Image (tube, grey):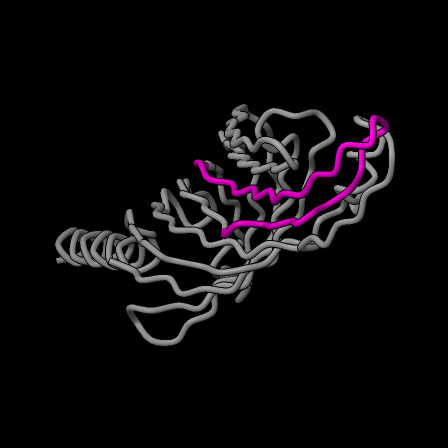
Amino acid sequence: MKTSFTSAVALAAAVLTNSAVAQTATPFKGYIGAEYGAVKFKDQTSVASALVSAVGGSASSVQDTGINVGRFFGGINLTENVGAELGYVMSGAANANFSGVSRTSVSYSGSASQKVNGFDYSALIRPNLSTGFNGAFLKVGGHSLSIQTDVSVATGSSSGLSSATTSGTGSLIGIGYDGKINEKLDFRIAYTAYNSVAGISGNDTTLWTIGLVGKF
């Protein structure tokens, strides 16, 4: 009977151990979401100043100082501590209107707009579930973004349109928090710093966003 009882205890311990592992292990959980934010331009050099540098004379301009940004994303939690995420970023248009007289006394006026779109990718690192702060995350990764610029200029005798796209890659780092709304839905607050947007050295920006995350 002693041998039988020992075997029963060992079997019970094995069952309890496996049950505990099943309860604490983090399954592969996927999610999708959307977030919205705004970027304030770090470079406040006016279009007028750039035109005077290029063609001389005098100029004036009115321009946006920020831009709205939307991001759609999806990811997977590989463990309770590590996840992977892919996002698609798109912005509204930042606009400027300008007018002036060149060094050769040619009067001109026009408008310009810029917008950004592309992808980012990152690894998300979270604290253990036991800490109670598993919703917080650090993200590190990169991006491949494009800037589309459209310009229209008119003078007394002619007019012209120009469009150009600049593309390139850079890195990103950010922090954020996913807070529980219910079993299937979280809210997200995040801060992300993008370096070398469109591959342009020094063209860095930071983005605050708020959004929703659907879990499956």
Left or right: 121, with 5 as reference point: right
Quadrant in the picture for residue 16: bottom left
Q: Is residue 85 above or below residue 184?
A: above
Q: Is residue 10 visible?
A: yes
Q: Position of residue 140 (x, y in %)?
A: 57, 38
Q: Residue at x 67, y 43 (%)?
A: 109
Q: Residue at x 42, y 72 (%)?
A: 180
Q: Is residue 130 visible?
A: no
How many dots with numbers? 0
Q: Position of residue 170 (x, y in %)?
A: 59, 28
Q: Position of residue 123 (x, y in %)?
A: 48, 38
Camera-side residue of 120 and 69: 69
Camera-side residue of 108 and 20: 108
Q: Mostly what secondary structure, the magenta segment?
A: strand
Left or right: 57, with 96 as reference point: right
Q: Which residues are magenta?
A: 92-119
Camera-side residue of 1 and 66: 66
Q: Is residue 167 above or below residue 58?
A: above
Q: Residue at x 41, y 43 (%)?
A: 87
Whether 101 is among the magenta residues is yes
Q: Is residue 10 above or below residue 171?
A: below
Whether 141 is among the magenta residues is no
Left or right: 27, with 198 as reference point: left
Q: Residue at x 55, y 59 (%)?
A: 37
Q: Quadrant of the C terminus?
A: bottom left
